[in-house]
Image (cartoon, grey):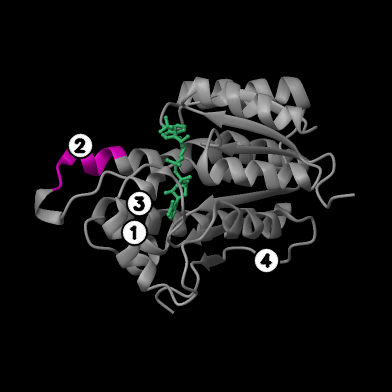
Amino acid sequence: MGSLVDKVAIVTGSGRGIGRSIAEALLNEGAQVVISDINEELITQTTAELTSKGGKVLGVACNVTVSESIDKMVETVISTWGRVDILVNNAGITRDALFMRMSEEQWQAVIDTNLTSAFKVTKPVVKVMSKQRSGRIINIASTTGVHGNFGQVNYAAAKAGLIGLTKTVALEYASRGITCNAVAPGFIDTAMTQALGEEIISKVTEKIPMGRMGTPDDIAQAVVFFAGPGAYVTGQVLEVNGGLYT
Ligand code: NAP
């Protein structure tokens, strides 16, 4: 039996990539998982695939930049499963450009989707968790938010902000049995990094001490640790990056 039996988890942006792997890992531990994404086709496909493997899965469309959409998702989860034990703020985008060439639109889109989204989604969920006097919030940051990265000033600022949000929510809710931690992935093999092209991928991979890109499941395993019932850990950032920047 898994460590998360009967726990209800929401994973944003879980139609594909890291979010989907997180959903699968939580399901493997016995949790009931809400597959939430902006892309409805992906939700239908992923929900069907994970259900066919025997998981208790609920697909709910949600754009994490829109408060009404978030409220609707949380209402649907509560009316279906009655509680929320685990929230993984995973949805994220990149809009890369060097600092001088970055437009305000690129800046704002990344701040909205990677940072303000966590503020908006955590609010209604932490209300539910407060009443339960228990909860696990895990924010998917990035090594870029810790160390910076060329061409990603918007993304670095958003992820650094997400780490600040994590540490503050951790302080404010520790007394209610709610922990809030961040996982900061390094260079992980998903559509987000495949879009960079072969040349950049092999240049970055050369710099990773462990000699390979990470897999979405490498990140999912760190999330499972923070989601665990006994975790006496809050306000922490775990870099999962094969030794990059260490
Ligand atoms: P991905 O493959 O692009 O998946 C992200 C998912 O989020 C997609 O299904 C996407 O939908 C969805 N999404 C985008 N905007 C959304 C919105 N407004 N509301 C709800 N869902 C939305 O990315 P990933 O690589 O799995 O990344 C997942 C998280 O890990 C992100 O926060 C990312 O910043 C972080 N991360 C990734 C890496 C990496 O190397 N891959 C490294 C560090 C951190 P669409 O398909 O419609 O776009």
View quadrant of ligand 1: top left
**Amino acid identity at mark 4:** Val
Identify whether 211 is placed above or below 159.
below
Marks 1 and 3, how far apart in space?
23 Å
Identify whether 11 is placed above or below 199.
above
**Amino acid identity at mark 3:** Ala
Label 2, secondary structure: give it: helix
Q: Earlier in the sequence, mark 1 or mark 4?
A: 1
**Amino acid identity at mark 2:** Glu
Marks 4 and 2, how far apart in space?
37 Å
**Amino acid identity at mark 1:** Ile
Q: The C terminus appears in which quarter of the rendering?
A: bottom left
Q: Which residue is mark 2?
A: 105
Q: Which residue is mark 1?
A: 201
User: Of 14 and 200, which appears nearest the observer?
Assistant: 200
Disc number placed over residue 233 in the picture, else none? 4
User: Of 174 and 20, which appears nearest the observer?
Assistant: 20
Q: Earlier in the sequence, mark 4 or mark 2?
A: 2
Q: Nearer the viewer, mark 2 or mark 1?
A: 1
Q: Which residue is mark 3?
A: 158
Q: Nearer the viewer, mark 1 or mark 3?
A: 1
Marks 2 and 1, how far apart in space?
26 Å
The residue at 35%/51% (across/down) is 158
